[in-house]
Amino acid sequence: MNISEEELLQQAKAGDRAAQAEIVYQNERMVYNLALRLLGNSEDAENVLQETFLKVLESLDSFQGKSSISTWIYRIAANFALMRLRSRKTQVVSLEDYPVDEIKDYQGFNRALGDDPLKALLNDELKEILNSAIEQLPPKFKSVFILKDIEGLSLKEIADMLDLSLAGVKSNLHRARVFLRNQLAEYVGKNQR
């Protein structure tokens, strides 16, 4: 379909199945990838995909257009994925009292990871270790880290999506990065020698 987002939304709200299918088609890969990154499991990601689009189609009439359709869908998907994460109750590490002032400054890690963690993912071994460390993050830190540093969303988009304050997003992201830096510091320090 080659129509504006507003027209597509109006047609979908009016019950046009082709417009509804187009909304799903345009966003399904984004939803699946987000769910897969947050949950680390293709079966759970597929379930979140289905739950998300059932909710989207049920709720089209209530969508007011204050954000783009994709941002609205992303928020729904993130919420379903986070609910699944919380229900697992397998939080390995609590970061609530994590000593953020005791960041170990490993030069090798800072050069490899710096402000752009995606650069570090080029190394397969480091990618595996990073993925393992990300899995240890509690859901609220994991989701913010993935949305910002992997998906590339802005802090404001994340705040809107997860219904958090901007300060809350920044705090959660900082705690996630500190935890990951400390988890990966030994590996990077060992490989920089």
Image (cartoon, rainbow, N blue to C red):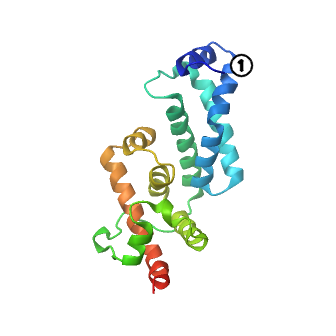
Q: Which residue does the image show at 36% across and 68% down from the upper left?
A: 98
Residue beneath the point at 42% across and 74% down: 109
Percent coordinates x, y for residue 12 in the rendering: 63, 18
In the rendered view, tell whether residue 99 sits above or below residue 171.
below
Point out residue 148 in the picture as x, y percentages from the top left corner.
44, 51
- Could you tell me if residue 36 is visible in this image? yes
Determine whether the residue tagged by mark 1 lies in a helix, strand or loop: helix
Image quarter hosting the N terminus: top right
Query: As shown in the figure, which amino acid type bears the numbered disc 1?
Result: Arg
Would you say 95 lies left or right of 52 here? left
Q: Can residue 91 be seen in this view?
A: no
Give the residue drawn at x 63%, y 26%.
Answer: 57
Which residue corresponds to the image point at 59% horizontal and 50% vertical from the top-left? 84
Q: Which of the two residues, 27 or 140, is positioned nearer the viewer here?
A: 27
Q: In the displayed structure, would residue 52 be above or below residue 82?
A: above
Check the picture and name the quadrant holding the C terminus. bottom left
Foreground pick, 68 / 169: 68
Q: Looking at the rendering, which quadrant does residue 52 occupy?
A: top right
Give percent across and percent down for residue 161: 45, 39
Crowding at dot 1, Cα within 10 Å, few <14 / some 14-19 / many 20+, comes out as few
User: Which residue is under mark 1?
Assistant: 17
Question: Furthest-top residue in view?
Answer: 14
Which quadrant holds residue 162?
top left
